Image: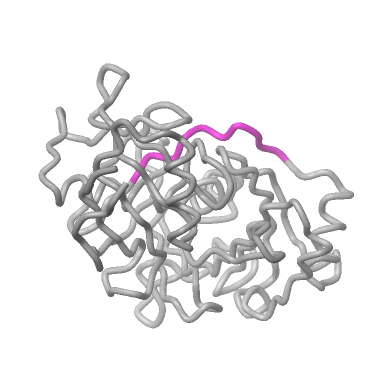
Amino acid sequence: MKQRPFKQVDVFTPVPYRGNPLAVVLDGTGLAEEAMQRFTNWTNLSEATFVLPATTPGADYRVRIFTSGRELPFAGHPTLGTCHAWLQAGGRPKGEQVVQECGVGLVKLKRDGERLAFAAPPLLRSGPLANEDVELIARGLGIPRADILHHAWCDNGPHWRGVMLRSAEQVLSLRPDGAALAGLDVGVVGPRGKVGVIGARGASDPDDECAFEVRAFFPGNSGMAEDPVTGSLNAALAQWLIGSNLAPARYVAAQGTALGRAGRVHVERDEAGDIWVGGASVTCVEGSVLL
């Protein structure tokens, strides 16, 4: 074991302790997978990441992303938080953009003022959910099946199933049944404005910057858990919603409200058709960790 540089970063917020925290070990060289998993479980955070030298030409660094009990090929808030920590620690990209190597391949990141944004990786599975899945999700969320207006696979590594409800208020009122939803990763989105967006409030609305409210439910150690702010889900939701004309090409989503957080996820489709998902990050703890 040795002391390794470490940062704990709050992601999707410029204000400490209002987003989604992430543990970043900035030197993961020589660590066994078991040691990475053990440390991740010990942190009691949703994810921890370990920075390693790139093995693919063109990448600036490699990252391994762990959650409780398993490694993830990709996750959004760990991608942004790791890049923030790497840059803050003196990392310098080879080109204009940062290129991260992870389980799904190469992920591009760009700086947008004080925010970082990643290019959403291709969906591994898309299209509508099976009817039995939609009915099960409705039962698990405690709502009538008719209140699920739209649904789709949002699988970009994590196997998210996405559903759109009638309103943000309905999304925030959910009390999911963990037993009914056991084994499912479920992302729920509802417009803050009129149903059917493109009547939802957009980023230019002076009263509320957010067009959508998002919640993410997944299996946890003691039943169904909820993620404060979820980059992978928001990336896949954006690909689905924008691609289906259910959302404008640029919007801001709120997440974490039900948990007392204030996550803000900035989404934009550029002229080339790429979806960029971004947010602010702030370092809350830094030093070293014995690993």
Give residue 218's position: percent from left, percent from top.
65, 57
Give residue 53's position: percent from left, percent from top.
25, 28
Residue situated in front as seen by the camera: 264 or 190: 264
Q: In this rendering, would 104 be left or right of 287?
A: right
Q: In this rendering, would 284 be left or right of 196?
A: left
Residue positioned most to the front = 1
Q: Quadrant of residue 27?
A: top left
Residue positioned most to the top = 57
Vertical comparison of 149 with 240: above or below: below
**Magenta stretch, overall SS:** loop
Q: In this rendering, would 127 be left or right of 119?
A: right
Q: Give the range drawn in magenta.
A: 118-127
| Magenta stretch: includes residue 124 | yes
Residue situated in front as seen by the camera: 6 or 182: 6
Vertical comparison of 183 with 30: above or below: below
| Magenta stretch: includes residue 104 | no
Q: Residue at x 21, y 45 (%)?
A: 86
Vertical comparison of 125 with 43: above or below: above
Q: In which quarter of the image is residue 252?
A: bottom left
